[in-house]
Image: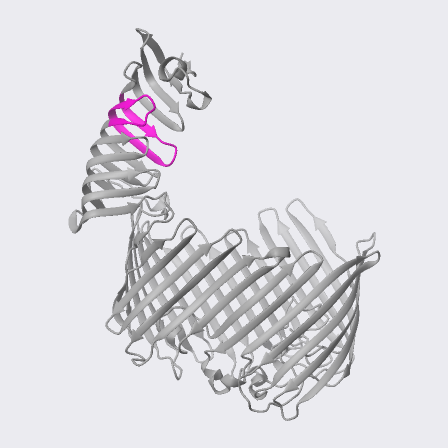
């Protein structure tokens, strides 16, 4: 029977030890000799202050406060560091001593082997003539993929840093680099100031170059990363700053460049966001996007933005109160909008406050709003309610509005849900810089009633719900037509099928008497498979010409809307939506998204078709297919492919190909990308990238399935 001694400290460690200093010992046999010598043998395990020691034999000399240990030995400090050795001499609290023929393993990943390891104060582990690697070593191939050989290595398990003296880095046994002094974070440290792994980049416009990131930890909650980028065509400094506060956070990235593409200009970009919690439940958020020229982000592959948005928002959102104020500036980078750049809104201010008041028979919602739109152009615009953005000139608009809505919902014993809404709103507009500056106002009233009957059935394998919905609504307005600034692009989908108005904003309101009909079906199977379907259509008493033809909402009845989603757990899902008429079933708009993922293959794709509509600044059909795939070719090789294909012109807009080699201790990544599109400011280009990283340093942990398997 194994012997157990739970209060070892009372007899051996300290006569005044408290509960947290108590050591626990488990062994097959324990005996005490001469009242000061304890001998434990057979499966010995000692636990003391979070440190666990296992060995074959332990002799404790109380007079010398010394442990003599016979291995194999395992010393686990509880913080991710484990020392294995053949024999050891340690003090009574396991904090100081020498371990012979030892190996230090950090986070089950990085191994440091030495003839002797010294523990100092329980914090430092010193190794002499050390070999460091995270690679699996097999008998038939004893040379690791990479290793660091050093005369001395010190591991600080409090700061989670590793210090090397006279270190040589070897790749496949060949010395590659020598470092008199070297400091690296272990795999348990999240952040440490130092030089990061460089990346090689090549671009047909910028030439062959190298990026060398340097990380600076500015305390526990802030850091800066500076990345010099040097090539034959550019000198660039990239930067990223991050900081978290007790009540907020900041994240900013940017770059400055001098290059041969625009040799007389200093090129730059700045993209950042910040948020802070304010008193009384408010939250302040700021987004900044700025760039020196239209092609800089694309030339350097920093971002795929084609419009820049700089915005400051003040928000308070409670259960019964919403307050939101924002100031937004826009700048276009789209080639097809350069000619009307000054006619696009350059500064927009908005304010909205909404209050919900519970009533005995429903809910009252009160809303107040205000906003302004400013354009840099001084060219007079054309007033109207449905004027495309290209023709508004420099029209500036200010608007103030009030609204009240009464909402009531009742559920009958049969499950029938009856919802009634009545809404009235008023707006006043002041319009300047038009062919005739004018003030105008409008009052809008809407009433609606909706009936839906959810019907459900549950079987041993699935749960089904089918829900028919019918909604009747009537809207009327009085007053002069107002300028249309926020309702130029209309999307007809399941999100607004039962809305009081399909227009996204308030400047244009869907009018007249109409009936909205929908049929929803949802099922969830016991194996995790889920299906949801929606079919719907809109019927009107009078012919409607408010919408563009491509919206699918014109006439006495709209086009059919069909949407669905299929989900098969975490492996596969597809979402699709289409708008088509009932005469020849021609599709005006269609889109689909696909996702598949398993242990070897991953696929993400999207398909979109939009019918040409000049009134929506879309003179040609938009028909694209986007795919992004990755496949595990073997244990260590991963391939990836991504492309955006234009089905109208039968040409590829963008394509990328990648190949990654990954083991338990190394990752090598190579990729090539080609952009085929060409505009007045952007030329087609091809870029190459190469990166090399080591496991065991920093926080990246590779999947164990990439670990090498030794034969024999």
Identify which residue is drawn at 39% across, 24% down: 48
Determine the image quadrant of residue 611.
bottom right
Please give the range of residues in magenta.
69-98
Residue 497 locus on image (x, y percent)? 68, 69
Would residue 134 be seen by someone viewing this image from the given angle? no
Q: Which of 594 and 68 is in front in this view?
A: 68
Identify which residue is drawn at 26% across, 33% down: 103
Q: Is residue 378 left or right of residue 80?
A: right
Residue 693 locus on image (x, y percent)? 29, 53
Q: In the figure, 558 relative to 627: above or below? A: below
Identify which residue is drawn at 68% across, 75% down: 506
Q: Is the magenta stretch mostly helix, strand or loop?
A: strand
Q: Quadrant of the N terminus?
A: top left
Q: In the figure, 326 relative to 389: above or below? A: above
Determine the image quadrant of residue 369.
bottom right
Residue 279 locus on image (x, y percent)? 61, 56
Residue 364 locus on image (x, y percent)? 78, 62
Q: Is residue 568 left or right of residue 365?
A: left
Q: In this view, does 381 lie to the left or right of 252?
A: right
Examine the structure image and report whether residue 696 is included in the region drawn in magenta.
Answer: no
Q: In the figure, 117 relative to 319: above or below? A: above
Would residue 646 be seen by someone viewing this image from the given angle? yes
Examine the structure image and report whether residue 78 is included in the region drawn in magenta.
Answer: yes
Q: Quadrant of the C terminus?
A: top left
Q: In the figure, 634 relative to 18: above or below? A: below
């Amino acid at each position: 029977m194994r012997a157990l001694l739970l209060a070892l400290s009372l007899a051996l460690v300290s006569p005044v030890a408290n509960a947290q200093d108590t050591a626990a010992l488990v062994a097959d046999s324990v005996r005490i000799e001469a009242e000061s010598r304890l001998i434990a043998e057979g499966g010995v395990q000692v636990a003391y202050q979070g440190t666990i020691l296992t060995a074959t034999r332990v002799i404790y000399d109380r007079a010398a406060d010394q442990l003599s240990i016979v291995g194999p030995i395992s010393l686990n400090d509880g913080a991710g560091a484990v020392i294995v050795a053949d024999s050891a001499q340690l003090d009574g609290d396991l904090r100081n001593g020498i371990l012979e023929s030892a190996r230090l393993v950090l986070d089950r990943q990085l191994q440091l082997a030495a003839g002797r390891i010294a523990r100092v104060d329980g914090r430092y582990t010193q190794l002499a003539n050390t070999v460091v690697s995270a690679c699996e070593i097999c008998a038939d191939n004893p040379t690791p993929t990479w290793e660091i050989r050093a005369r001395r290595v010190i591991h600080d398990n409090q700061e989670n840093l590793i210090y090397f003296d006279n270190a040589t880095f070897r790749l496949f046994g060949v010395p590659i680099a020598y470092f008199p002094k070297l400091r690296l974070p272990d795999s348990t440290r999240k952040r440490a100031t130092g030089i990061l792994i460089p990346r090689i980049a090549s671009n047909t416009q910028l030439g062959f170059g190298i990026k060398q990131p340097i990380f600076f930890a500015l305390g526990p909650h802030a850091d800066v990363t500076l990345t010099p980028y040097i090539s034959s065509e550019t000198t660039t400094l990239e930067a990223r700053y991050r900081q978290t506060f007790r009540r907020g956070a900041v994240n900013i990235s940017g770059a400055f460049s001098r290059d041969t593409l625009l040799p007389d200009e200093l090129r730059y970009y700045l993209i950042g966001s910040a948020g802070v919690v304010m008193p009384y439940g408010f939250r302040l958020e700021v987004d900044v996007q700025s760039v020196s020229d239209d092609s800089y982000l694309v030339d350097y592959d920093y971002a795929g933005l084609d419009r820049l948005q700089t915005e400051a928002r003040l928000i308070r959102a409670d259960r019964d109160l919403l307050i939101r104020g924002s100031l937004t500036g826009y700048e276009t980078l789209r080639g097809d909008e350069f000619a009307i750049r000054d006619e696009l809104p350059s500064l927009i201010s908005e304010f909205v406050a909404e209050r919900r008041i519970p009533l005995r028979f429903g809910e009252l919602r009160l809303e107040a709003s205000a906003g302004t739109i400013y354009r840099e152009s001084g060219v007079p615009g054309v007033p109207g309610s449905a004027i495309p953005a290209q023709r508004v000139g420099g029209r500036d608009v200010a608007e103030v509005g009030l609204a009240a809505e009464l909402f009531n919902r009742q559920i009958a014993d049969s499950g029938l849900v009856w919802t009634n809404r009545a809404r009235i709103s008023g707006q006043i507009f002041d319009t300047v810089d038009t062919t005739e500056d004018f003030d105008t106002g409008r009052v809008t009233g809407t009433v609606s009633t909706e009936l839906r009957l959810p019907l459900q059935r549950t079987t041993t394998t699935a749960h089904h719900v089918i829900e028919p919905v019918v909604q009747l609504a009537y809207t009327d307005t009085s007053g002069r037509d107002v300028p249309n600034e926020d309702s130029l692009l209309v999307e007809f989908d399941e999100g607004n099928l039962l809305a009081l108005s399909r227009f996204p904003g308030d400047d244009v309101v869907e009018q007249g008497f109409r009936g909205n009909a929908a049929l929803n079906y949802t099922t969830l199977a016991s194996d995790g498979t889920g299906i949801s379907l929606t079919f719907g259509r809109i019927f009107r008493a009078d012919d409607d010409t408010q919408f563009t033809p491509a919206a699918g909402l014109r006439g006495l009845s709209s086009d059919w809307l069909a949407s669905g989603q299929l989900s098969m757990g975490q492996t596969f899902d597809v979402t699709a939506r289409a708008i088509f008429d009932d005469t020849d079933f021609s599709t005006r708009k269609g889109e689909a998204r696909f996702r598949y993922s398993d242990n070897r293959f991953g696929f993400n794709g999207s398909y979109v078709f939009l019918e040409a509509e000049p009134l929506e600044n879309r003179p040609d059909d938009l028909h694209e297919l986007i795919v992004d795939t990755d496949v595990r070719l073997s244990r260590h090789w991963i391939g990836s492919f991504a492309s955006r294909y234009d089905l109208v012109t039968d040409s590829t807009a963008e394509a990328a190909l990648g190949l990654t080699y990954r083991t338990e201790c190394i990752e090598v990544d190579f990729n090539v990308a080609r952009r085929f599109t060409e505009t007045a400011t952007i030329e087609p280009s091809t870029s190459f990238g190469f990166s090399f990283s080591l496991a065991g340093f920093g926080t990246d942990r590779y999947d164990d399935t990439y670990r090498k398997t030794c034969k024999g």
